Amino acid sequence: RYYAPMMLSLILCIIAVYCCSNVHSKKVKQFGYLLVTSQRSGSTWFCVLLSSIKGVQCGTPQPNKAVTYNSELMIKYSYINHSIPFHWETWVSESERHFAQLASSQSNAGHLIGYKLMYDQVREENRDKFLKYCSDNDISIIHLVREATPNRFASQNAMGSIKHSTNATEAAKSKETTQKLRTTVDKMAPMIKDTEALVSRWSTAIRLSVATYSQYVVYEQLQDPKILSRTLSSLLSGISSNHMHYDGKSSSSLLKLHADRCEDRVVHYQVFA
């Protein structure tokens, strides 16, 4: 009779431990993704928008800054730093470290975690290795493209004077004072041709790869709220099996890039058309 209470207590402890471990084992899986794109294609706005959706994180939080998430985690490999030696194994290690940090920063499981990656931060010669890396690690790919290439060049040209702003008045003023891009057909035509060829190569390679999931997203189409809502809903359901959905309530605190027509951004654009 003396051992009965002790045995009962031991049994209750075992049951409690089992229940606790069982709860933890049912944690919803985290899903990784990469937003593959090029500079000045609306990726910062899109990443902030993604991060405003419950259960999604694009980059690491940086409180008290206009851009609330540092989403470009591999910026050291950008074209401006191509003097830095590129070793594929090192790149993979850094990417895995970023994903580990993103996973650990989440207070709850069941999130979509990722960051944005420019074409030149992988380098074309590593594209096949990159796509295999995504496939082997169940990393989904969101391919964001700004199809109005002249506008992207105009945005790049103005980048020194325009910064991301959360203030609508300031942003509107900056758009009004932004100078049109002045260039010639001889300069612009090869740039457009090369850029569109690069996007096409990446798009084809991603489409033909065995990545877990991939989706081609056109920046200009996201200006339409209905298309934006459908796109985000498709992304959430495609990347995650956690039955996530977009409720249409989230929004980015950053304004989108210029939604103007190419002729509004480039001097004598009709000559190029």
Image: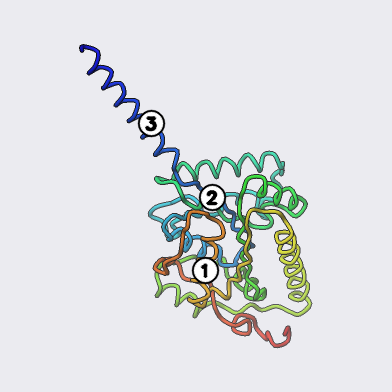
As drawn, the label of residue 18 is 3
Which image quarter: residue 118?
bottom right
Under circle 1, the secondary element is loop
Mark 3, secondary structure of its residue: helix
Spatial CA distance of label 1 from label 2 is 34 Å
Residue occupying the far top of the picture: 2
Pointer 2: what residue?
Answer: 31
Q: In which quarter of the image is residue 192?
A: bottom right
- The amino acid type of the residue labelled 3 equals Tyr
Q: Provide residue 110's location: percent of width, then percent of height.
A: 46, 49
Q: Residue furthest front?
A: 1
Q: Earlier in the sequence, mark 1 or mark 2?
A: 2
72 or 19, nearer to the observer: 19
Mark 1 highlights which residue? 162
What is the three-letter code of the residue carrying label 2? Phe
Residue 137 percent across, percent down from the top left: 63, 45
- Alpha-carbon distance for marks 2 and 3? 27 Å
